[in-house]
Image (cartoon, rainbow, N blue to C red):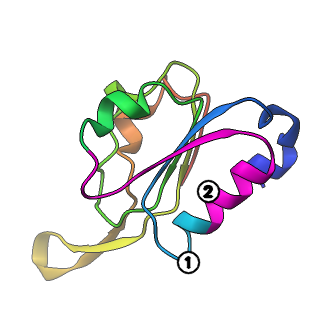
């Protein structure tokens, strides 16, 4: 909904999709490309992911690594879309869901973050 609502902002925007799954990564790459964004895909073998993310106005995280994307990696006012959902064991043997973005470190840097 964030991208659809502001689809006019996609044209000419730089975007990075971190993850290349057939369920999320590839469709997000195609959606952004179809709307005339310049899109880069990063994956487990990509070198310098933080530097690549720093160039992006739009960051899509869909790699399955909890809190992987850090606020210090973001371009000021980037739009961050966190598609990650990973269950992690926490205290007392309970599980908790985490996204791929370290939400706390991104607050105040990103213009918008989806949980």
- Which circle's residue, 1 or 2, is located before the other in the chain? 1
Residue 95 position within the rendered picture, expressed as x and y whole percent measured from the top left: 26, 78
Give the residues in magenta.
27-46
Would you place residue 101 above or below residue 62 in this image? above
Q: Nearer the viewer, mark 1 or mark 2?
A: 2
Q: Residue at x 42, y 34 (%)?
A: 53
Q: Residue at x 26, y 58 (%)?
A: 44
Residue 37 lies in the magenta-colored region: yes
Residue 114 position within the rendered picture, expressed as x and y whole percent measured from the top left: 59, 50
Residue at far left of view: 92
Count the numbered circles shown.
Answer: 2
Q: Secondary structure at mark 1?
A: loop
Q: Work out how far the residue at label 1 is from the one at label 2, CA to CA, in angstroms.
A: 11 Å
The image quadrant of residue 66 is bottom left
Q: Looking at the rendered structure, which numbered label has been put on residue 23?
A: 1
Q: Looking at the rendered structure, which numbered label has been put on residue 29?
A: 2
Residue 67 lies in the magenta-colored region: no
Residue 81 position within the rendered picture, expressed as x and y whole percent measured from the top left: 57, 49
Q: Is residue 89 left or right of residue 60?
A: left
């Amino acid at each position: 909904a964030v991208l659809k609502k502001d689809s006019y902002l996609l044209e000419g925007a730089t975007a990075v999709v971190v993850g290349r799954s057939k369920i999320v990564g590839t469709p997000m790459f195609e959606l952004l490309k179809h709307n005339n964004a310049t899109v880069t895909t990063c994956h487990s073998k990509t070198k310098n992911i933080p530097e690549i993310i720093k160039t992006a106005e739009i960051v899509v995280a869909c790699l399955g690594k909890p809190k992987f994307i850090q606020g210090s990696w973001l371009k000021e006012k980037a739009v961050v879309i966190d598609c990650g959902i990973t269950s992690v064991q926490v205290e007392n043997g309970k599980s908790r869901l985490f996204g791929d973005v370290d939400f706390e470190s991104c607050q105040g840097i990103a213009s918008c973050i989806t949980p």
